[in-house]
Image (cartoon, rainbow, N blue to C red):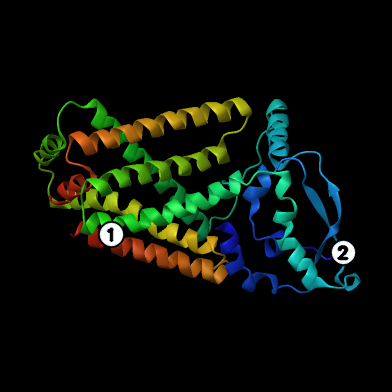
Amino acid sequence: MALLLRVIARPGVCLARPQYSVIYRHVAPMGTTAKEEMNKFWAKNAKLNRPMSPHLAIYQWSVPMMMSVTFRGTGVGLSGAISAFALLALALPGQYPYYLDLIHSLSVGPFLIGLAKFGLSFPLSFHTFNGVRHLWWDIGKGFRIPEVYRTGYTVIGLSVITSLALCLL
Amino acid sequence: MAAIVRLSSVCRRGVRPLLYQSTLLSRPLVVPHKYQEQPHLLTARIHASQALYAGAGSKAASMHWTAERALSILLLAMGPVAYFSPGPVIDYSLAAALTLHGHWGLGQVLTDYVHGDAKIKAANAGLFLLSTVTFAGLCYFNYNDVGICKAIALLWSK
């Protein structure tokens, strides 16, 4: 299937830059894999106790960068929430409706309930829509910078609208 | 005055499959364009390169990548199904798909941030344990309690 995706994605790519070419006829075999090289890099630098160059602290933050971080954050968060739910299901003695009634009996008020619903639905919406954006990239589309920003803002807009709609349900 | 090639513009496979090919990797020789005769044939050769080196590495990473995307699409489709026809079949399917999607996703996070053979092994073992318990818990919930779809419906009804 990867081959099929590559065949579909190919027409727009290879014809792009006719002035550059690569010859595979004359090749030099490498002694190590990229994974081995990576491990060597980390082992050497950790052993020499080298400090890491500043990266997050100095690089100018951009919308795509923040969206990528948020995508990962929502993914980890949602996964953690699912795992927590599963663990509680195994550990706690009662049934789900009992605990739901327990939470309802706290009578927090509609605004806080709406806020909680938004807090649950926004990560899910954002992760879903940005996930679709990632799949779009995976078939080779939308890599130009203006497209990255356009699809990015679309994802943000859709996420907010969807989460608002969901918490008003 | 050698021409610099942006690897991404000619090699559509992406970086990850390259990381897992073991022995027979090669560095391509880059030459100025005017010294080359048939660029269209070269393009064909580059895209055949995975088949050329097929014997030299496993396709496991590439297949894993594809499986991750296929599962994501499947999970996307499960959303509307869960909404319009809730029930035990979709409950258990969601449990499996969500757990696996999370497992693979967290696996990528670990691959990015955990370095060193022993730490990688320990982290992956821990992740496997977490995913197993998560799946067990979700199945237990589906069996002994109201089930995922009903739980979400009940949660949202307030």
Instruction: Name the side, left or right, on which A105 lies relative to A81.
Output: left
* Image location of residue B108, percent across then percent down: 52, 42
C-alpha gap between disc 2 and disc 1 = 53 Å
Name the residue nearer the viewer: B79 or A147: B79
Q: Which mark is residue A60?
A: none
Image point (36%, 38%), residue name:
A80
Circle 2 residue: B31
Residue B39 lies in quadrant: bottom right
Name the residue nearer the viewer: A49 or A135: A135
Residue A19 versus residue A38 in the image, above or below: below
* Image location of residue A145, percent across then percent down: 57, 68
Instruction: Name the side, left or right, on which B143 lies relative to A106.
Output: right
* Image location of residue B119, percent across then percent down: 57, 27
Residue A100 versus residue A65 in the image, above or below: above
**Quarter containing the C terminus of chain A:** bottom left
For residue B49, say whether it is visible. Answer: yes
Amino acid residing under circle 2:
Val
Q: Which mark is residue B80?
A: 1
Amino acid residing under circle 1:
Pro
Name the residue nearer the viewer: A103 or B8: B8
Image point (74%, 50%), residue name:
B53
Instruction: Name the side, left or right, on which B85 lies relative to A157.
Output: left
Instruction: Name the side, left or right, on which A34 lies relative to A124.
Output: right
Q: Give the structural element (helix, strand or loop) at label 2.
A: loop
